[in-house]
Amino acid sequence: MGDTGRRTTPPSVRQEPTPMPRLAFYALAVCVLSVAAAVVSFVQGSWLGIVWVLLAGVSSNMAWYYVRRSRGRGRSVTG
């Protein structure tokens, strides 16, 4: 019938990869440093290394969250 104005094929737009967000970078740095601190603590015979391992787990989850959040932000329709 008539033209509805809709495109049948999506436009080919190249999207540049976004750089790692700053908070994800900081969380990754904290994760690496806390793993190093855990290793040093365990080598010295201190059980305080457990706290460093837990901190490494939390910071790695934060880094993963912020990376995934920044990737999904470009595709978000609502904002």
Image (cartoon, rainbow, N blue to C red):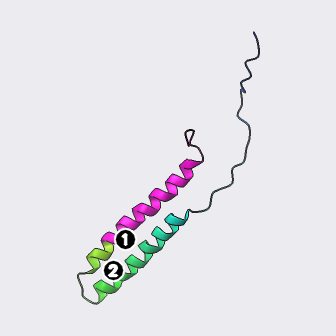
- Relative to 33, say whether 25 is above or below: above
From the viewer's perspective, tell me whether residue 74 is left or right of residue 66. right
Residue at the image position 69 percent from the left and 50 percent from the top? 15
Q: Where is residue 21 in the image (x, y as percent from the top left)?
A: 56, 62
By secondary structure, the bulk of the magenta-drawn segment is best described as helix
- Residue placed under numbered mark 1 in the picture: 56
What is the CA distance from the residue labelled 1 to the residue labelled 2? 9 Å
Residue at the image position 26 percent from the left and 75 percent from the top? 50
Q: Do the residues labelled 1 and 2 touch (CB within 8 Å)?
A: yes
Residue at the image position 63 percent from the left and 57 percent from the top? 18
- Viewer-side residue, 10 vs 20: 20
* Three-letter amino acid code of the residue under disc 1: Ala
Sooner in the amino-acid sequence: mark 1 or mark 2: 2
From the viewer's perspective, tell me whether residue 43 is left or right of residue 21. left
From the viewer's perspective, tell me whether residue 41 is left or right of residue 70. left
Residue at the image position 71 percent from the left and 26 percent from the top? 8
Q: Where is residue 38 in the image (x, y as percent from the top left)?
A: 33, 80
The mark found on residue 38 in the picture is 2
